[in-house]
Amino acid sequence: MAGDRKRLHPVGEPMNRRTTTLAVAVLAAVALVCGGTVGLPLVMFGQADAEAAACEVPSLPGSSPVPGIGSWGSVETTNAATIVAVGRQRKVPPRGYVIALATAMQESTLRNLANANVPESLSLPHEGVGRDHDSVGLFQQRPGWGSVRERMTPTYAAGKFYEALLRVDGWQRMRLTDAAQAVQNSGYPEEYQKWEDDAEQLAARVLGLPNIDDIGGGAPTAPCGVDDLGPVPVGPGGWVQPIRAIVGSGFGPRGRSFHAGVDMSKADVRGDPIRAASTGVVEQVKCDWYTTCDRDGNTSERGCGWYVDIRHPGNIVTRYCHMIQRPEVSIGQRVAAGAVIGFVGNSGGSSGPHLHFEVHVNVPSGPYNADRSNAVDPVPFMRARGALLGSST
């Protein structure tokens, strides 16, 4: 239950629906509506069906239920897909999907619950009845979260959960149960942790991925345009744009200083995914400001804020600066071209949300060797590799 220290199980419902495997009986996917509105679950049985469905306006939950996955039934899987869809639309990092799913698994076993103590809830569409104070819905939210109708609307309930989660300082670095508890204020704060594996697997399955860590890589599949976190086209040379945005400030001298990369931005760029420009190994994950990078920077500060260096074959290093929070990767991790490594922000020496992108060549082995002396202009470098910066493809 969100907002109270006491937690009661829904009436007549077991809380031991833990599954050790989530076999893929069908490939469930979340398709975003062309134009950016929230997409709801669609079942994709093959590439032709997927392409036909991807640009259709999806139906409301309940009218086109998603088949179950593993031991989770159709009702629960449909709700899981809705939770993930809301997270994608709000540009929540994938870790947030997992926390949200684990929370709903614990609170309601992924069912939209009415409450015997809340008569209005019994007249609304529901998938079970609980008795936990005045809590209702997937996340067992109490009146402070919204009206009864709002809290029993899965898209609204998920959205409110994500809003609260994103306000928790450092939530991505917390144990799952600590992040969930910071939102829910449950009387059983450790109970969310047991659902982490299930939540990771279910999030991956509703996205059509073998693993939640694989989000962002692969070949293009969306005929109506690449969505925020889905697969992106990788050029024949194995390179891809780190973000789809306009190149503003270019490479070269800037007054008394030297701009060793290019700045890429557009309207509403904050929170957009940043992708590895090519396959490589993460060499640096760092905040280079002496206090914290978990806030907006300004022009009086110096450095990249949260940044990542990736070493590619041929002694090439790419750098990605000013991320909104700690990056999604770790030192030594191998990443594929197009894999999401972080999200656009405004940390460090920055005047507004953007990606500062650098390319370094002939970089000696070891960290800290990518510097001004081996930096090259990313625009012609990427153009030569079939990944034109600032283009729509």
Image (tube, rainbow, N blue to C red):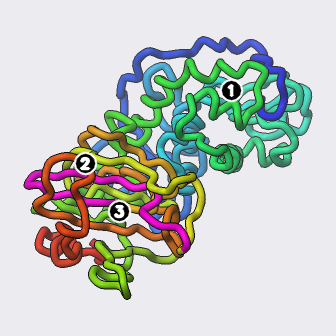
Looking at the rendered structure, the kind of residue marked 2 is: Pro
In percent of the image, x 53 and y 74: which residue is there?
299
Mark 3 crowdedness (10 Å alpha carbons): few <14, some 14-19, many ≥20: some
In percent of the image, x 22 and y 66: which residue is there?
359
Q: Which mark is residue 276?
A: none
In percent of the image, x 68 and y 49: which residue is there?
167
According to the picture, the residue beneath numbered tag 2 turns out to be: 367
User: CB under 8 Å between callouts 3 and 2?
Assistant: no
Element under disc 1: helix
In this rendering, the answer to whether 83 lies above or below 391 is: above
Q: Where does the C terminus fall, quadrant-wise?
A: bottom left
Mark 2 crowdedness (10 Å alpha carbons): few <14, some 14-19, many ≥20: some
In this rendering, the answer to whether 377 lies above or below 336 is: below
Report the span colored magenta: 300-319
Furthest residue to the bottom?
255
Residue 59: x %, y % from top left: 55, 52
Looking at the rendered structure, the kind of residue marked 1 is: Ser
According to the picture, the residue beneath numbered tag 1 turns out to be: 108
Decide which of 134, 92 is in the foreground and name it: 92
Q: Where does the N terminus fall, quadrant-wise?
A: top right
Give the mark nearer the N terminus: 3 vs 2.
3
Tell whether position 310 is magenta.
yes
In this rendering, the answer to whether 259 lies above or below 208 is: below
For the residues carrying marks 3 and 2, which lies nearer the camera in this image? 2
Mark 1 crowdedness (10 Å alpha carbons): few <14, some 14-19, many ≥20: many
Decide which of 175, 21 is in the foreground and name it: 175
Q: Which mark is residue 226?
A: 3
Give the mark nearer the N terminus: 3 vs 1.
1
Residue 130: x %, y % from top left: 80, 23
